[in-house]
Image: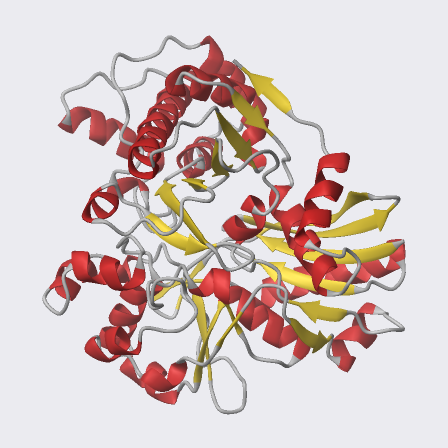
Amino acid sequence: MTKIAAIDLGAESGRVIVATFADGKVELDLINRFTHMPLTADGGLRWDIAALQRHIIDGLTQARIRHGDIAAIGVDTWGVDYALIDAAGELVEAPYCYRDKRTDGVMAEARRTMPDAEIFRRTGIRSMQINTLYQLIAHQRQRPASLTTAQRLLGMPDWLHFWLSGERANEQTFSSTTQLCAVGAKEWDRELIRRFAIPDHLFADIAPAGTVLGTLRPALARECGFTIAPRVVLPGSHDTASAVAAVPGDPATTCFISSGTWSLMGAHGSGALTSPEAHAALISNEIGVGGAPRPLTNIMGLWIVQECRRAWAKAGSEKSYAELTRLASEATPLRAVLDVDDARFLHSSVDSDDMPSRIRQWCAEKKLPAPADLGQTVRFILDGLADAYARVCANFERLSGKRFAAVHVVGGGGENQFLAQLTADACARPVITGPTEATALGNVLTQAVAIGVLASPAEARATLARSIALKHYE
């Protein structure tokens, strides 16, 4: 029996989960779950690093109490955000959240240096203002002294691995989200970095998922109560990479959606899609666990519902996600389709108008009737998501030359049975959901292979298949 911990951080909440590997199966135990939100500080929207560290230490301490010593620990997070560290290994400043408004207008400025099409040809990544490339252009423009002081750029999970182990590494799946790597993300695109006047010394070698960095720092091991320090292992450090590593079934015939705050929809086994047609279809060729390209499209996701719920709770109408989904299922659908990827829906209500107001504004601009109540608003969003999924599925079939027999949804969004049925209806094919905890499963399975608990990725897939139950929607 072997215990492995996943520190799984989304852009709204985080968890520490312990996996037990025994009798050919893997079983997960949720140790703690916590909310983490960016704060407005030092002129920007930034992550509360001290709070994240406290939650992780609490989770690891509780994990040790419940499970004893743990063999390995690995972190996955959302993509694109980064930390700058100085020569002493200290943070130069609190990391920005990708929803900060500093990148507004930066893409237009960047096009004067390099057109979007050339950036896509070089990196294989769709241009989005949240990408690390555009964040760094904004950083260079607004706070150049920080980049001068910094000795190294680490992605958010890379920085957390450094804090845990004392070892610095830029993990490949996360690095592929930055739009700063050459296609395939085996190396940084130094010419692109130079063209945008980003300091070249910030970027060191890229390490593949499955790299064993070392062990938990002695001081942290003592604080958490471990008698034997766990190894610190790079999983697919981008949460989508870990989630897709836990998509069961035949990758040649299935389109996947990793559904949560964002919806990441794509296809396995298509190779990198870098044609002008792929660029026009908003494809990003991120890298999966194992190093192969994993083409996908970013869709705004359940973030819009999350922000509506936050606004309604603030106004005195607090409802659970289950209640909101029930109201949506009972609501009359509008005769319009919400563009869930409209840029106005990107920003947090912390520094923008609330989300329901932005939806009403979108409807007014389109001369469409606005949703009448909470249920109709959520129905409007979910219908918009299902429509987006259908369009993206059709794009992947056209570009890859494949016909997908089903759409497989993993992650927390797969628990929304109403959305799953809307997706099946919109895509005109079966939808399969599960596992809900795909990110944590992909994380620990990668670690298990790395430390020899499982012999190979094939054994990891077999272990996964024996351990999960799926739901089907026609």
**x and y percentages locating residue 55 in the rendered image:** 67, 59
Residue at 25%, 57% in the rendered image: 120
Residue located at (29% from left, 78% from top): 143
| Image mark count | 0
Q: Position of residue 11 (x, y in %)?
A: 49, 51
Question: Quick check: 17 left or right of 413?
Answer: right
Q: Is residue 362 left or right of residue 451?
A: left
Which image quadrant for residue 216? bottom right
Which one is nearer the viewer's eye here, 444 or 333?
Answer: 444
Q: Report the front residue among 451 and 149.
A: 451
Q: Residue at x 25, y 77 (%)?
A: 191
In the picture provided, is 227 more to the left or to the right than 303?
Answer: right
x, y percent for residue 292? 47, 55
Instruction: Provide residue 48's location: percent of width, then percent of height.
Output: 52, 63
**Residue 47 in view of the camera:** no
Residue visible at 67% across and 47% down? 441
Q: Farthest residue in the left direction?
A: 112
Q: Examine the image and state in which quarter residue 167 appears.
A: bottom right
Which colour assignment does the render follow? secondary structure
Q: Is residue 289 above or below residue 278?
A: below
Is residue 49 something that shows in the picture?
yes
Relative to 51, is 354 on the left or the right?
left
Toward the bottom, the furthest residue is: 87
Relative to 278, is 403 above or below? Answer: above
Frontmost residue, 197 versus 101? 197
